[in-house]
Amino acid sequence: MIPVAHFMFISASLFCIGLYAVLTRRNTIQILIGIEFMINAAVLNFVAFGKYDKISGGGQMFALFAIVLAAAGVAVALAIILNVYRYFKSIDPTKTDTLKN
Amino acid sequence: MDDLIPYIPLSIRDSLSSLPFLSAELCLIMGFIIVIIADLFFSKRFPQLSFIIVFITLIVQIYLNAGFLKIDNTPLFGGMIILNHLSVLFKLLFSLTSILFVLFVRFNKAFQNHDKGFGDMFAILLAVHLGLNIMAMSVNLLMVYLSLEMVSLGSYLMVGYLSAGKRQTEAAMKYALFGAVCSAIMLYGISLLYGFTGTLFVNDPSFISGLKSIPPISSGLALLMVFIGIGFKLSLVPLHFWSPDVYEGAPTPVTAFLSTAPKIAGFAILINFLKIFYDQRSDGLSTSILDWSFILACLAILSMLLGNFVAIWQNNIKRMLAYSSIAHTGFMLMALFIFSAGGFKAIIFYMTIYVIMNMAAFIMIDEIEEKTGMQYIDELKGFGKQNSILMISLLIVLLSLTGLPPTVGFTAKFLVFSSALQAYNSSGATLLLIMIIIASISTVVSLFYYLKIPMNAFLRDSSNPVQFSIHSPKVYLGVFLAFLLLLLTIFPSLLEQII
């Protein structure tokens, strides 16, 4: 059986890759992919830990909810990005910068 | 699988017996479905139908909620949410905000003239309101995440709803991206907390004992990650970047809503979350895992300093109010240090006044912007001489926001100050004293920027005076709210009776 530490290691690296993508990418879609990485790292954690919580099954349940909410979040974000593209002809967050102090 | 069977009838019975306590939320869901159907099929013939339905839903919801005002801690749905006096008060506060928001949207020109109409906006509002209500009650990490996301997704849509122009879409994008990152970090923190403790129930004794059994650095990190998600909703200082941009870019009614309701809900979650760290012996927050009072005091100090000092330099009125709302959040945090009914009473009183003041300020500023196109403070020169009723009401609201002595804003600030002093007396921490001193200094600083508007309006002369008719619903609403503030100045007990 695979020890739980391995799952935690993989999920931590997934989370860090996602965070790195969010901080460095200059394309909004790629940032969204980074966010998906971070959410899926958490989902992996939930499923791995959920194995030890059989009666209430909280982890598995949470993973299902998190997947659905991630999909909903991406749908909303993509709709907003489409709108941004219509006005700016670019989805680079550094170029769409009209609101300033 | 077989060992789960005895639990099924039990949990079904529990869920069924919990349903009557959620009558207000069921009413919101009904309203949500009816608004969508009405907007789809009847919006051409009866354009006002969705407004009427939303208004009735909210009123019925208030009535249903008020019935639970005297309730004691009641765990529902297997303890996933808890209904108590405090959460009912929060829910009533959300209802007040939503009603003001609905009226604001109804009489806003940008929403009236938009070809989408406001039907969808009202549907989103009811969904967000449902999320806010659950936020006020949740003690389970799943419910916390679910309700927080419900509110967030709805607010992204609200900001981008009109999609009129570059600034609005940009604001919506910034909000959605920043919010999604914060909620992803929070989700990861929740997954770690679940792994450390084996339970999702925050109020379960094994939650706190599990946290204590592992090294403080890992549990502290996980708690901080969860706190990032809550802090985003509160727009506390390290996580405030989005708020000035979003508040400036969003349609004014949405700005007014976002600067009040989700913030209040964030406080509700924070209170539920901090309850487990409450230490009976020292009458303060426990320091064994994470020094909460240190973190909260630092955040409060930073928010008050940054909010107030940056607001001075703003010329755009909405941006100025955004920074001032950051400062108000920092101020409200001060009431959390004394973790008793008195502290909660102070915070609820402050929030109610804050909702009325903020909504009134945005309603009047929106009226001015709609009629004259003015967005900047120095454009208001000589404005008060022509439109005195509107500007005097705005003056009352701004004085109240500052917290000058005769106004009700002062009463609210006084309550928060006294609960923070009480916390200082019982703990004796120097940081709390520093926080209280900074709070009083920043109150003085806030005079400078709040009073810039009436100073320009009344004392300076303008080369081309503008005058517009004051007979519009929004002016009436603004004047009514200012009058309400005056009434509460004289009789604060009207509000205190409910709390």
Image (tube, rainbow, N blue to C red):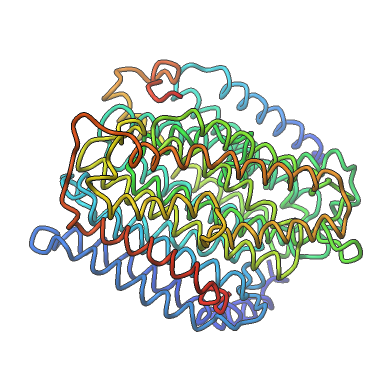
Of residue B225 and residue B294, the one placed in the foreground of this image is B294
Q: Please tell me whether residue B110 is drawn above or below residue A91 in the rendered image.
A: below
Q: Please tell me whether residue A95 is drawn above or below residue B336 in the rendered image.
A: above
In the rendered image, which quarter contains the C terminus of chain B?
A: bottom right
**Figure label count:** 0
Q: Please tell me whether residue B66 is drawn above or below residue B287 in the rendered image.
A: below
Q: Please tell me whether residue B53 is drawn above or below residue B63 in the rendered image.
A: above
Q: Residue at x 88, y 43 (%)?
A: B216
In the rendered image, which quarter contains the N terminus of chain B?
A: bottom right
Q: Position of residue B320 (x, y in %)?
A: 46, 36
Q: Is residue B377 left or right of residue B17?
A: left
Location of residue B462 by image quarter? top left
Of residue B314 and residue B118, the one placed in the foreground of this image is B314
Q: Residue at x 60, y 37 (%)?
A: A40
Q: Position of residue B260 (x, y in %)?
A: 48, 53
Name the residue at the left extreme.
B45
Q: Position of residue B158 (x, y in %)?
A: 36, 46
Q: Residue at x 82, y 43 (%)?
A: B431
Q: Residue at x 57, y 37 (%)?
A: B308
Q: Position of residue B287 (x, y in %)?
A: 87, 50
Q: Is residue B102 left or right of residue B200?
A: left
Of residue B76 and residue B128, the one placed in the foreground of this image is B128
Location of residue B79 by image quarter? bottom right
